[in-house]
Amino acid sequence: MTAAPDPRIGTGPASRTFGAIGRAPTGGLAIGGAGGAAPRGPGALAAGPGGGGSGNRAGWHRRAGALPLGYLAALVVLALLHPWLPTWRWLAIHLLLLGAVTNAILVWSAHFTAAILRLAVPARRRAQATRLAALNVGVLAVLVGGAADQPWLGVAGAGAVFTAVATHLAWLSRHLRAALPARFAVTVHYYRCAAAALLVGIPVGAWMLVVDDTARPRLVLFHAHVNLLGWVTLTVLGTLLTFWPTVLRTRMADGAAAASRTALPVAVTGLTVLGIGVLAWWPVVAAGGLLLVATAAALTARPAWLAARGKPPASFAAWSITAAGGWLFVALAVDAGMLLTAGSPAVAADRFGGVLTPLLAGFVAQVLLGSLAYLLPVMLGGGPAAVRHRTQALDRHFAQRVVTANGALAVFLLPVGPYVRITTSLLILAALVQFLIPAARVLLTARR
C-alpha cells in the first residue's frame, strides 16, 4: 500500500505550511490547513471552539498547547527545588506522565480521531474542554495529595482523572461505531486500547495511596507497566502510522497500515501477559509479555524506518521522535533483564528506577517534545510565513539539543560518579529549557 502523492506532502519549503496526514488514492486526511485557512477536502479537520474557522481552531490549540508546556515548566522548577522535596521523584514522574503527557494525549488523540473518521466540525468544544478541566483538577489533586501526604485527596483526584479518561474512551467508541469505514481507523482502536489500559492502571495507583502492604511491590510494577506501555506507548504506536510520514513530509511506506493492524493485538496480548506476570510474580511470563510489546513496536517501526530511509529526518521533531524510538527498545530490554534477575517483587520494584530513566527521559519526553514541535506551528495557523517562522524557532540549534540530551542520558545510565550524574542531569534539563522557551514564545506571539 503506497499513499498517492499529495501536493500538501512535499519536499520543498512550501510543505512546512501544511499538516497533512498521508493522502491515499481513496481520499485525504488533514490535521491542519494551508496558510491558516480551513483545510479543504473530505478528510479535513479545522475544528475550533465556536466554529470551524482557522482563528477558532488556533485559539483552541493555543490554550490546549499551553497545558503540557505548563506541566513541563513545573518539571523544570521541581528539578531546581528537588533537594528540599522528599517526594520529588514521584512528583516528577506524575508531572510528566499524568500532567504533560495525558493532557497531550487527550487533545491530540481526539484531533487525529476526528481527522481519520472525517467527523463534522463541532460547533463548540464544550465537552472536550470539560474533560480537560476534570482531568487537570484531578491531576492537581493527585499531585498535592501525594506530595502533602493526603491520600484521600489523591484518591479523589484519581477519580476525576478516571472520569475524564472514561468519557474520552466513550467519545472515541461512539464515533468509531457511527463513522463510515476509514482506511486508518486502526489508529482509533489503538487509542481505545490505550485508554482502557489507563482505566485499569488508575485504580491501582489510587489504591497504593491509601494501602501499604506486602502486595505493594507487585502493584507498583503493574501500575507502572500498564500506564507507561499501555496508555503512552499504545497511543504513540497508533499515532505514528499517519503522523510519522507527515513529520518527514513523505509518502507512507508500503504495508504501514497492515503492520499497525497486526501489531495491535500483539501489543495488547503482551500487556495482558506482562500484567499477569508481575501480579503473580512470574518473571519469565512478564519478560515474555515485554517481548511481545517489543515485537509490536518493531512491526510498526519497520515501515517507519522505510519511510525515513527514503526521506531522512531533517528537523527537531523528526530526530526527537527517532531518538525516542531507539530508547523505547533500550528500556524494554533493560526492563526484561531487571525482571529476570530481580529475584523478588520488592527487589524488582526497587530496581525499576533504572527502567524509568530511559523510558521517561529517553522515550516519553522526547516523543512528546518532537510531536509538539511539529504540531504547534501548524495548528496555530496565521499563514505560510507564520508557520515557517514558528517551525524555524522550534528547530533552532536542534542538532545540538538532540545530541546533548541523548548523549547526556547515555552517560547518566553508565556506572559513573555522582558529579557526572549531576552534570548530565543539568544538560538534559538545559535541553528541555531550550525547547520550552521558544515554544512559549510561539504560543504568546500566536495570540497576538
Image: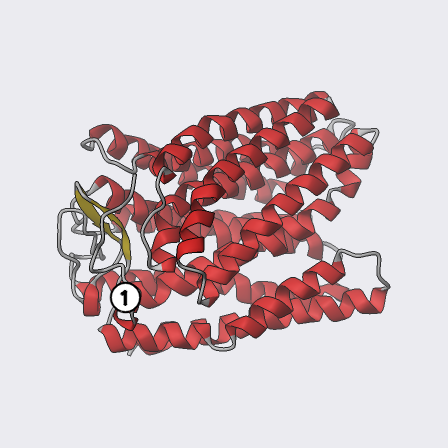
Give x and y (percent) for residue 28. 19, 48
Q: Coloured how?
A: secondary structure
Residue 409 location, x and y as percent? 69, 61
Q: Counting other residues with Cα less than 10 Å from the Cα at mark 1, is it few (<14), some (14-19), or many (20 or more)? A: some
Residue 187 lies in quadrant: top left
* Residue farthest to the left, as pictured: 41
Number of on-image labels:
1
Using the image as rendered, state which of residue 79 and residue 147 is in the foreground.
Answer: 79
Residue drawn where x is 36% and y is 74% of the image: 390
Tell me what residue is drawn at x 71 percent, y 35 percent: 336
In this picture, residue 179 sits left or right of residue 89: left
Q: Residue at x 37, y 72 (%)?
A: 391
| Secondary structure beneath label 1 | helix
Q: In the rendered image of this protein, does residue 178 appear above or below residue 21?
A: above
The quadrant in which the C terminus is found is bottom left
- Under mark 1, the amino acid is Ser
218 w.r.t. 136: above or below: above
Res. 440 visible in picture: no
Q: Quadrant of residue 287?
A: top right
Q: Identify which residue is drawn at 41% across, 35% down.
A: 260
Q: Nearer the viewer, residue 92 or 283?
A: 283
- 224 or 427: nearer the viewer: 427
Residue 322 visible to an observer of this rendering: yes
In the figure, residue 256 lies in which quadrant?
A: top left
Image x and y of residue 370, in percent: 47, 60
Q: Which residue is mark 1?
A: 15
